[in-house]
């Protein structure tokens, strides 16, 4: 496994059965957490849906409850003073990274030198744009834009 937060958030999202709103806490006792909150897990789903999480044969850890660890992580972030709004942004960023990890590129028709997002992963790019607050289409433009720098000229290609 790589970064545990990926697996933990996916486990919490999978527990929701299609909803995006995770009511924290569900596993930890309420009196043991800093602050109850609703965590938006938009962009997360079953870990098998993400390329970054399926490359390893180790997807679960023996005797570890990923949902409990997800809640412990939220509580730890609250304990060190991370605000609810900032926690939401952290989870949006993490979900965006997972979705971008699914992105595949191909050459556009009639331009073997260019690149474009493959149709099969457009949904992942759109989700990443939404989570990051980027205007639709701008992320693909940024990812597929090529700039060449010579000694005196910086030119987009």
Image (tube, helix red, strand yellow):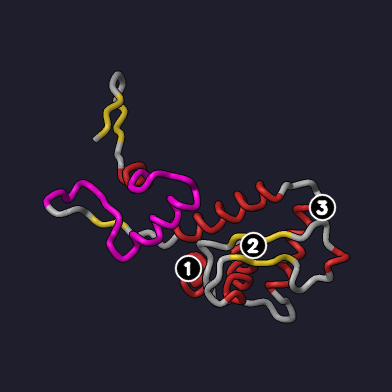
Q: CA distance from mark 3 to mark 2?
A: 17 Å
Q: Are marks 1 and 2 in contact (CB under 8 Å)?
A: no
- Numbered label attached to residue 50: 1
- Numbered label attached to residue 5: 2
Of tags 3 and 2, the one toward the viewer is 3
In magenta stretch: residue 126: yes
- Numbered label attached to residue 79: 3
Q: Residue 151: where, in percent of width, then height? A: 31, 21
Q: Dot 2, crowdedness within 10 Å: few (<14), some or many (≥20)?
A: some
- Numbered label attached to residue 135: none
Quick one: SS at disc 3? helix
Q: Residue 96: where, in percent of width, then height? A: 50, 55
Q: Residue 15: where, in percent of width, then height? A: 61, 76
What residue range appears in magenta? 110-138
Left or right of 57? Residue 64 is right
Can you say which quadrant of the picture contains the N terminus?
A: bottom right
Q: Are marks 3 and 1 in contact (CB under 8 Å)?
A: no
Judge whether residue 59 can be spotted in this image: no
Residue under the point 22% across and 47% down:
114
Please identify the quarter of the rendering in which residue 24 is found: bottom right
In magenta stretch: residue 120: yes
Whether residue 8 is situated above or below residue 153 in the rendered picture: below
Label located before the other in sequence (1 or 2): 2
Can you say which quadrant of the picture contains the C terminus?
A: top left
Total tally of numbered discs in the picture: 3
Which one is in front, 64 or 19?
19
Please identify the quarter of the rendering in which residue 76 is found: bottom right
Residue under the point 65% across and 60% down:
39
Of tags 3 and 1, the one toward the viewer is 3
Label located before the other in sequence (3 or 2): 2
């Amino acid at each position: 496994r790589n970064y545990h937060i990926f697996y933990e958030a996916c486990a919490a999202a999978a527990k929701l059965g299609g909803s995006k709103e995770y009511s924290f806490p569900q596993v930890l006792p309420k009196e043991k957490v800093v602050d109850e909150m609703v965590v938006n897990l938009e962009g997360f789903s079953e870990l098998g849906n993400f390329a970054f999480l399926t490359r390893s044969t180790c997807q679960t850890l023996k005797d570890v409850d990923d949902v409990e660890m997800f809640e412990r992580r939220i509580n730890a972030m609250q304990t060190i003073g991370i605000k609810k709004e900032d926690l939401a942004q952290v989870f949006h960023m993490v979900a965006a990274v997972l979705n971008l990890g699914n992105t595949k590129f191909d050459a556009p028709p009639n331009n073997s030198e260019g690149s474009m997002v493959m149709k099969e992963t457009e949904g992942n790019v759109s989700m990443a744009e939404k989570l990051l607050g980027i205007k639709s289409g701008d992320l693909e433009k940024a990812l597929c834009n090529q700039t060449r720098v010579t000694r005196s000229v910086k030119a987009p290609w």
